[in-house]
């Protein structure tokens, strides 16, 4: 939602970076730093920190938002499952990778909408209201981040608990504790004792494991079709004919008859939605 707030401000400020030339005249380009500074001001990144440092913070946020969206949401699970589905069908490059990624992106937005809304209401909205009334201080920015990250932390913990992959959390936390010569007792630890440095890689590994398990289940019916077609071709003495060439139409027919796209996407979304916590 911070990205949405930034994108909401930038169109109004970016227009000041370019002067409107007369018809047929040369295009006059002004310094774009002014537009970035105005965008930082609209977002409350003024006061307490120097202007240059505020710009660095703003650009850093813009740079890490895509990584956060990919790694800390259900995007990883969805895009891997859909990619494995394409391989199981044997359609080579169909659907194209752009379609797979685009569909995964919008499905992620649908599933993550409640979490993003809670992040905005908990951290970003109060911060913007405070910054509009008074100068924003670094302490306010840190407090806003602490409030905004809690719904995302809850989402990742819910998914790990939903899939039963807590051993990944203890493995990474135990490695960090061993490096610091500190003992780890999972029975006495709570989610508050686990920071993002442990939670994020644990969540990614959990999503990878879940995605490959789902991909295995999707592969099975198509594997059966390939084996049946291969056995029939061998029994008919047509060993030189590639089984994939014959099985592909049957796999496509089966997938269409069972309404495969709706079935797979619904199962992907419903597998995440129950763990959102409202």
Image (spheres, rainbow, N blue to C red):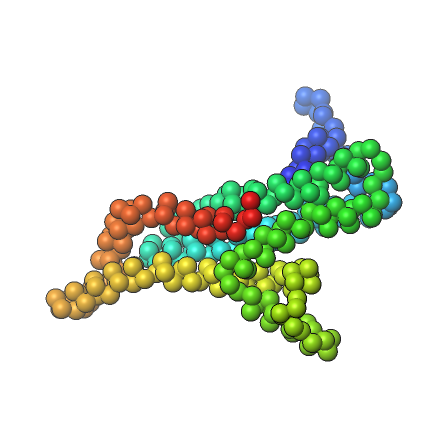
Q: Position of residue 250 (x, y in %)?
A: 23, 53
Front-most of residues 215 and 190: 190
Q: Residue pushed farthest front?
A: 188
Q: Position of residue 215 (x, y in %)?
A: 40, 60
Residue 33 occupies quadrant: top right
Residue 14 occupies quadrant: top right
Give the number of callouts: 0
Front-most of residues 236 and 132: 132
Please report the residue visible at 68 percent of the width from the left and 21 percent of the height from the top. Answer: 23
Q: Residue pushed farthest left?
A: 236
Q: Residue pushed farthest top?
A: 23
The C terminus - image quarter: top right
Please report the residue visible at 60 percent of the width from the left and 72 percent of the height from the top. Answer: 171
Q: Is residue 168 left or right of residue 254?
A: right
Please report the residue visible at 61 percent of the width from the left and 53 percent of the height from the top. Answer: 154
Q: Is residue 235 left or right of residue 46?
A: left
The N terminus - image quarter: top right
Please report the residue visible at 65 percent of the width from the left and 44 percent of the height from the top. Answer: 119
């Amino acid at each position: 939602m911070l990205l949405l707030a930034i994108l909401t401000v930038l169109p109004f400020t970016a227009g000041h970076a370019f002067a409107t030339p007369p018809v047929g005249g040369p295009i006059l380009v002004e310094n774009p730093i002014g537009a970035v500074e105005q965008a930082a001001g609209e977002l409350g990144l003024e006061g307490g920190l120097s202007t240059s440092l505020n710009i660095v913070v703003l650009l850093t946020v813009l740079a890490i938002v895509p990584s956060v969206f990919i790694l800390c949401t259900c995007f990883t699970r969805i895009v891997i499952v859909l990619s494995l589905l394409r391989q199981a069908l044997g359609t080579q490059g169909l659907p194209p990778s752009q379609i797979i990624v685009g569909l995964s992106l919008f499905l992620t937005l649908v599933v993550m909408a409640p979490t993003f809304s809670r992040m905005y209401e908990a951290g970003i909205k109060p911060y913007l209201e405070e910054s509009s009334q008074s100068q924003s201080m670094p302490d306010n920015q840190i407090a806003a981040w602490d409030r905004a990250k809690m719904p995302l932390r809850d989402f990742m913990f819910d998914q790990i608990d939903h899939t039963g992959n807590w051993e990944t959390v203890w493995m990474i936390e135990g490695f960090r504790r061993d490096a610091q010569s500190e003992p780890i007792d999972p029975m006495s630890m709570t989610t508050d004792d686990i920071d993002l440095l442990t939670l994020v890689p644990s969540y990614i590994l959990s999503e990878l494991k879940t995605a490959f398990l789902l991909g295995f289940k999707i592969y099975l019916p198509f594997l059966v079709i390939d084996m049946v077609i291969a056995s029939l071709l061998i029994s008919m003495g047509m060993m030189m004919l590639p089984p994939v060439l014959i099985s592909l139409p049957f796999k496509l027919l089966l997938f269409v008859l069972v309404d495969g796209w709706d079935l797979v996407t619904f199962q992907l979304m419903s597998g995440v939605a129950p763990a959102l916590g409202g």
